[in-house]
Image (cartoon, rainbow, N blue to C red):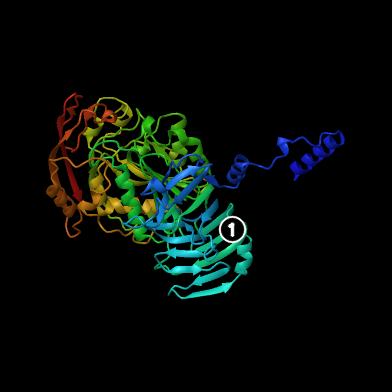
């Protein structure tokens, strides 16, 4: 308002001086840059850059382009569409959100389009699910439709309540003709979609066009893909621009965002992507009030990734390569709001100093070089504390690269040790180094060390540090897996079930899904299958020893082990690691036990 008055005053004064004919840029209508700034100030973030289709993809890109700052989809007589075409946003799925964009549609009266949200992609690339409808004739625009599902959920001007049994009750909220008259034909219109839990509202040009409260859990979707539709039919053109997204605090669930680091080691180890995808799948399948979203291969490109997160879990390489390193301030702002944090395996290590102090404040402990150590050993967890994270977890023993001697908060204030065991003396007798050993570690010979812990921050936020999970196969161990799943629920602030998070033991085939490296030709699946089966026999104590060999390419990154093979069993001896320009082999030995 002040800008308008300022412009009027300037025009009036200059008019009196005879300069009324001049144009004044400062008084011009706000442009896209100012609109984007206003959207960002209100929590919306752009997910289309206005120049390229980076982050967007269609099975057939020949229908899609960018024209004058707008996503453009077009069919012609020479290039018709034989089926509906969809341009998918690749960076993430939608859960609870608000989406705003401008659209324009031209062509014949049969021109049809839509905005798919919380949808899924079928094997034939057809996107099915909720659709905010668009057409040129006026029959569908502003309606909520379910593509290849329950079809029309609410006409333009309707509010529909869908009962758990699928019965729909619709009432008129506005005359649909009035809403149609509010549209700009063959021009740009503002579409606004709000979805929170089962409550969905569509608006066009500021007016509610339809509303649905979907209580039919069998068919409704609370998360899924975002896509723009180009409908099959006569030649037409549809455009979308100024696409901005704001995530909303989830109304029915707690949300945890799992960030998986890029490929790191070798087959079956440090499987960040496969591990996060497996944990998220088990949470989503078994805990209805938790929604787990995964971002693969490093820091999310999605600018809204953490905006409605109740907790974040990081599984990545540590040290200078830690994915948090360029984003410490951003994460600190989230932690100050009480967002939970878990760091798994190497992710508990970050450089000493400012980064280490951050992680100490967020997590209650971290791996500090020249203080903490990273040997492989068989940890026997004979007793577990009474804590929500240990619900349903029995004492167990398993081999892993269990880091220990963490740098914890002073006097362990707020820290609850979750897994503690006495490491073999051999793990303390290595040469001094950033990760191998130091006098402080040797002075604790025979004493228990904490390898997993819970942290209650003063502001109510929760942290969980877990140093295991070097071996991807360990997720098949029921107690190992349940403890981590419990912890991921706990850091969101949700209640852990009395018997812990239930989950079906993943098969060897499921463990092999989504891994970063190809299976070695000499990988012995039968012996791994035997190991997994013996782990989860509840009637007796069992043990299993396995030795195998794998070929390792010369580029294999082993620097965090100080160029040495670590002791993979209490009985094995250290073997020097030699870098080579040719392929070399090493032998891997471990023992695994279950009580």
Judged left or right of residue 468, residue 214 is right
Q: Where is residue 29, by image quadrant?
A: top right
Determine the residue positioned at 38% across, 30% down: 320
> Vertical placement of 182 versus 457: above or below?
below
Determine the residue positioned at 61% across, 59% down: 183
Q: Position of residue 439 (x, y in %)?
A: 31, 27
Q: Label 1 belongs to which residue?
A: 204
Q: Residue furthest toward the right? A: 16
Q: How packed is label 1: few (under 14 Cα within 10 Å), some, or many (20 or more)?
A: many
Judged left or right of residue 19, residue 576 is left
Of 300 and 383, nearer the camera is: 300
Residue 494 seen anywhere in this rendered image of the structure: no
Q: Position of residue 123 (x, y in %)?
A: 31, 56
Q: Number of labelled discs?
A: 1
Q: Residue furthest toward the front? A: 77
Q: Position of residue 364 (x, y in %)?
A: 43, 41
- Secondary structure beneath disc 1? strand
Determine the residue positioned at 36% across, 29% down: 369
Of 136 and 220, nearer the camera is: 136
């Amino acid at each position: 308002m002040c800008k308008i008055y300022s412009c009027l005053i300037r025009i009036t004064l200059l008019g009196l001086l005879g300069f009324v004919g001049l144009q004044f840029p400062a008084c011009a209508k706000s442009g896209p840059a100012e609109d984007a700034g206003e959207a960002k100030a209100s929590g919306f973030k752009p997910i289309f850059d206005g120049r390229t289709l980076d982050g967007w993809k269609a099975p057939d890109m020949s229908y899609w382009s960018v024209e004058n700052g707008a996503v453009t989809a077009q069919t012609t007589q020479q290039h018709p569409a034989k089926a509906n075409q969809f341009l998918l946003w690749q960076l993430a799925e939608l859960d609870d959100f608000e989406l705003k964009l401008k659209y324009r549609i031209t062509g014949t009266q049969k021109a049809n389009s839509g905005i798919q949200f919380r949808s899924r992609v079928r094997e034939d690339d057809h996107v099915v699910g909720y659709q905010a409808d668009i057409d040129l004739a006026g029959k569908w625009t502003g309606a909520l439709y379910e593509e290849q599902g329950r079809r029309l959920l609410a006409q333009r001007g309707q509010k529909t309540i869908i009962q758990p049994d699928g019965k729909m009750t619709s009432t008129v909220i506005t005359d649909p003709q009035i809403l149609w008259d509010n549209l700009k034909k063959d021009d740009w219109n503002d579409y606004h979609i709000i979805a929170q839990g089962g409550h969905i509202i569509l608006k066009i040009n500021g007016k509610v066009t339809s509303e649905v409260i979907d209580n039919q859990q069998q068919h409704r979707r609370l998360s899924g893909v975002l896509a723009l539709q180009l409908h099959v039919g006569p030649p037409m053109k549809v455009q979308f621009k100024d696409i901005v997204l704001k995530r909303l605090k989830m109304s029915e669930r707690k949300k945890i965002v799992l960030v998986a680091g890029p490929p790191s080691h070798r087959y079956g180890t440090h499987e960040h992507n496969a591990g996060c995808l497996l944990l998220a799948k088990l949470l989503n399948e078994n805990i209805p009030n938790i929604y787990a979203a995964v971002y693969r291969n490093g820091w999310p490109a999605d600018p809204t990734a953490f905006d409605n997160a109740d907790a974040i879990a990081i599984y990545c390489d540590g040290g200078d390569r830690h994915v948090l390193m360029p984003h410490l301030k951003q994460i600190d702002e989230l932690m100050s709001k009480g967002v939970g944090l878990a760091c798994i395996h190497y992710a508990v290590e970050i450089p000493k100093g400012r980064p280490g102090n951050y992680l100490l404040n967020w997590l209650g402990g971290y791996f500090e070089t020249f203080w903490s150590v990273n040997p492989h050993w068989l940890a026997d967890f004979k007793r577990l504390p009474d804590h929500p994270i240990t619900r349903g977890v029995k004492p167990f023993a398993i081999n892993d690269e269990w880091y220990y001697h963490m740098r914890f908060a002073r006097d362990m204030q707020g820290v609850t040790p979750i897994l503690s065991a006495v490491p073999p003396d051999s793990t303390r007798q290595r040469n001094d180094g950033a990760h191998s050993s130091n006098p402080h570690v040797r002075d604790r010979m025979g004493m228990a060390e904490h390898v997993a812990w819970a942290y209650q921050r003063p502001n109510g936020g929760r942290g969980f540090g877990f140093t295991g999970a070097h071996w991807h196969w360990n997720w098949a161990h029921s107690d190992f897996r349940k403890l981590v799943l419990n912890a991921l629920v706990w850091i969101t602030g949700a209640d852990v079930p009395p018997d812990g998070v239930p989950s079906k033991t993943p098969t060897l085939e499921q463990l092999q899904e989504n891994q970063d490296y190809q299976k070695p030709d000499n990988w012995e699946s039968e012996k791994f299958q035997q190991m997994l089966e013996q782990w989860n026999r509840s009637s007796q104590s069992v043990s299993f020893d396995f030795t195998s060999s794998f070929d390792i390419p010369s580029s294999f990154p082993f620097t965090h082990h100080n160029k040495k093979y670590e002791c993979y069993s209490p009985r094995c001896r250290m073997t020097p690691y030699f870098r080579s320009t040719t392929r070399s082999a090493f032998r891997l030995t471990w023992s695994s036990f279950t009580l």
